[in-house]
Amino acid sequence: MRRWNGWGDETYSQALHAGAAAYLGRVMGEGVRPEDAAPADVVATVPPSRLPPHPLANTSGLDRVLHARGQSLPDWIALRTGRIPAFPDAVAYPTEEAQVRELLRYASAVGARLIPYGAGSSVVGHVNVLPGEAPVLTVDMGRLNRLIYLDEISQLATFEAGVLGPEIEAQLRARGFTLGHYPQSFELSSLGGWVVTRSNGQQSMGYGRIEGMFAGGRLESPSGTLVLPPFPASAAGPDLREVVLGSEGRLGILTQATVRIRGIPEAEEFRGVFFPNFEQGQAAVREMMQARLPLSMLRLSTEIETETTLALAGREGLIRWLKEYLSWRGIREGRALLILGATGSRSGVSYGRSEALAVARRHGGVDSGTLFGKEWRKSRWRSPYLRNTLWEAGYALDTLETATCWQDVSRMIQAIEAALRPGLEDIGEKVYCFTHISHTYPWGSNIYTTYLYRIPANGDPDETLRRWRVLKGAASRAIVATGGTITHQHGIGTDHQPYLSAEKGPLGMAALEDLAARFDPQGMMNPGKLLGA
Ligand SMILES: Cc1cc2nc3c(=O)[nH]c(=O)nc-3n(C[C@H](O)[C@H](O)[C@H](O)COP(=O)(O)OP(=O)(O)OC[C@H]3O[C@@H](n4cnc5c(N)ncnc54)[C@H](O)[C@@H]3O)c2cc1C
């Protein structure tokens, strides 16, 4: 069963071992466990629905609570403390495309706003109900989850858009195929959500971004149906798939998506390589990318993230031994860990590994074998559960991401961390932050920063939220000022909206607004997300 006020399945939790808890206490001060609101008390705050009855519209209090917010830190603060300012007036669970069309018709007829809901894993406010006069209908796509057609000859699979990551892989793998899209939210995010937020999987270097996988599909909009045939390529003017990618529910509901799949890889390997410092690691990663080596993942941590990984790993004896070995090889304080993944045929993996290790050696890298790679692989879906544990230990955790060209990567990391680290000094609180680059291109890289701060000892949600606003605002302004995109993979939602126009410019923003008006003349689709309400 899904956790109602945190991440993941409620039957699993990721423990924080004693050494890790002590480490956090040292770097940020002791945390105090905040009190959670009880689900029944939150359900009791749900007001009567403003929507007239419809057979597909469910108005139960619990369904409305479960669809009120996503997974951003402000969402967590609202859910954990039970202070949720607005709920959908009803939730619908269509099981066929015709029902989606009917729900669009109903919402339009009764003057409702409609929020498409994939799995609610958004971390930037995409699915939140914003307070307002108009009633809100949330359309949960989770029951539209079938494999419609598998074209084995062309390696194309058409799914209903509400299908979740594990269901996609299970159905494809049973037939000898894979999609290979593995965001860290894989367990609880949907194909439709991936497409319309331009999501990016952990092995995007090998499998590509969702933009490259999305071959076509069907979008039901208030103005009609947009059909995107899965051409292998086309020169027929601007590509309308690009209009759907990143549309964040503003244009309509994606009901089906055809994706480009491939055979299950024969071999896969992840290994850890340590560099004397982040700059040398970065130079090696850039060289590997520019040489177009056949790898599936390069994830390079800065010094602080490397030390945090080692401190939180828990296996103290082994880590001590590793540090001694690295020290003997000349790698000491300041070291940077690269997880290097290769996926494909046996010979391709072997070639990728040996070429990548040769580049790494030229930049001072030391191969530590597959231990760290195996650990990373084992915990790839488990590490987000730590956020629950940390919250319960009194620490709020959020992540930030951007992308920029290679020449600005170090400057960007410094700018983001310099904005975050002293952000709560005025109230005597420490912010702990660390960074990695994990989606790299020949031209540049994403930058992914994790930051933690203490929840106030009295658990005050307003103060927890104020601290987040101060930090998120400072880091976002630093990203814009340093010339990065406001988001490489999480999308715009509400939280990144103030920074979008800096990137698109006035003509670009006007063109996006015109597009939304063409698909949705009444402005009923997910207003306030991506673009203004
Ligand atoms: C722990 C964690 C780890 C994450 N890791 C990653 C990561 O590695 N990479 C990454 O890219 N993102 C990541 N995310 C962010 C999030 O998972 C992605 O943005 C994901 O694509 C959202 O999918 P969803 O199905 O949950 O969509 P939702 O959160 O339900 O919705 C997101 C947006 O898409 C719209 N939408 C959803 N389905 C449809 C549809 N069928 N038609 C039209 N609009 C629709 C919604 O209206 C909303 O605007 C992570 C989030 C969490 C909580």
Image: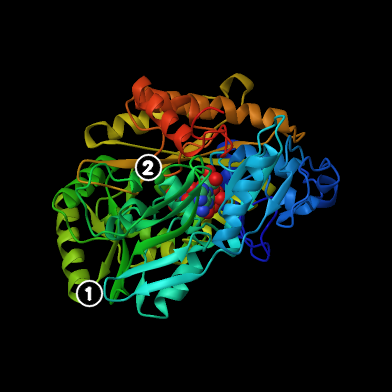
In this orientation, which residue lies closer to the viewer: 454 or 509?
509
**Marker count (numbered):** 2
Quadrant location of the N terminus in the rendered image? bottom right
In this orientation, which residue lies closer to the viewer: 142 or 329?
142
Q: Can residue 121 be seen in this view?
A: no
Q: What residue type is labelled 1?
A: Ser
Residue assigned mark 1? 345
Q: What residue is shown at x 48% (from left), y 32% (from top)?
A: 517
Neighbour tally class for label 1: few under 14, some 14-19, many 20 plus, Cα within 10 Å: some
Q: What residue is shown at x 20% (from left), y 61% (from top)?
A: 294
User: Looking at the picture, does residue 266 appear above or below residue 67?
Assistant: below
Q: Which of marks 2 and 1 is nearer the N terminus?
A: 2
Res 243 label = 2
Query: Position of 295 compared to 61: left or right?
Result: left
**Tag nearer the camera, 2 or 1:** 2
Describe the colour scheme in one phrase: rainbow
Q: Quadrant of residue 371?
A: bottom left
| Secondary structure under the numbered disc 1 in the rendered image | loop
Res 85 label = none
Q: What residue type is labelled 2?
A: Val
Q: Where is residue 414 in the image (x, y as percent from the top left)?
A: 36, 30
Quadrant location of the C terminus in the rendered image? top right
Q: Where is residue 161 in the image (x, y as percent from the top left)?
A: 49, 59
Q: In which quarter of the image is residue 159?
A: bottom left
Q: Where is residue 432 in the image (x, y as percent from the top left)?
A: 52, 36
Q: Position of residue 360 (x, y in %)?
A: 19, 54
